[in-house]
Image: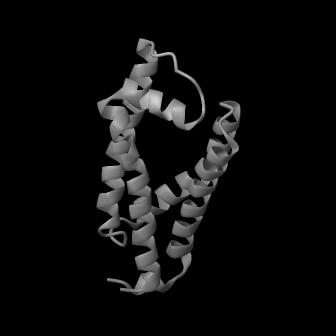
Amino acid sequence: MNLTLTIQKALLRFTALVLFTGLPGALLPGVAAEKFSWLMGYGQPPLCPIMIYLSGNAGFVYMALGIVVWMISNDPHRYRPLVATLAWILVVGGPAYLSIDLQAALPAWWVALDSLACLLVGGGLLWTLHSGTQKSEP
């Protein structure tokens, strides 16, 4: 297996693992919202029905996408168009998350982690796709 394909698989699996952190939100949305609020250094969040719904919904979507990305990581050459689409979504997601996080007034460490991780993983995937060495892979 060539180096770019190995890096591609690793980046996809890293992305899937990050997405799997949505499981607590999907299973226990109220508790997950409270723990997330604590992690951010905020107090007790308002646990109204819409807040619990949004937390649970986001957690479920993250988990579902994590499963899809993990499946793609098993054969990224076969799913090259999906890998390219995901890479561009992540590259665009960097500035998008920067804007969202700044509007939400999240801590600086979270803003940097969130936006830079998207940008770097998306950029890394694009680099592996355009390096040219993957084209010889069957």
Q: Compared to 123, does 18 lie above or below?
A: above
Q: Quadrant of residue 136?
A: bottom left
Q: Relative to 78, is 108 on the left or the right?
A: right
Q: Compared to 54, does 131 lie above or below?
A: below
Q: Residue at x 70, y 37 (%)?
A: 102
Q: Relative to 43, is 29 on the left or the right?
A: left
Nearer-the-camera pick, 21 or 83: 21
Nearer-the-camera pick, 1 or 47: 47
- The number of callouts visible is 0
Q: Residue at x 43, y 82 (%)?
A: 135
**Visible residue check, residue 60:** no
Q: Position of residue 78 (x, y in %)?
A: 32, 69
Q: Quadrant of residue 16?
A: bottom left
State the residue lying farthest toward the top: 48
Q: Compared to 75, does 64 lie above or below?
A: above
Q: Residue at x 64, y 43 (%)?
A: 96
If the image is split into quadrants, where does the C terminus sit? bottom left
Q: Relative to 68, is 110 on the left or the right?
A: right
Q: Residue at x 32, y 52 (%)?
A: 68
Colour convention: one colour
**Visible residue check, residue 15:** yes
Q: Compared to 47, does 95 lie above or below?
A: below
Q: Position of residue 40 (x, y in %)?
A: 58, 36
If the image is split into quadrants, where does the N terminus sit? bottom left
Q: Position of residue 63 (x, y in %)?
A: 34, 44
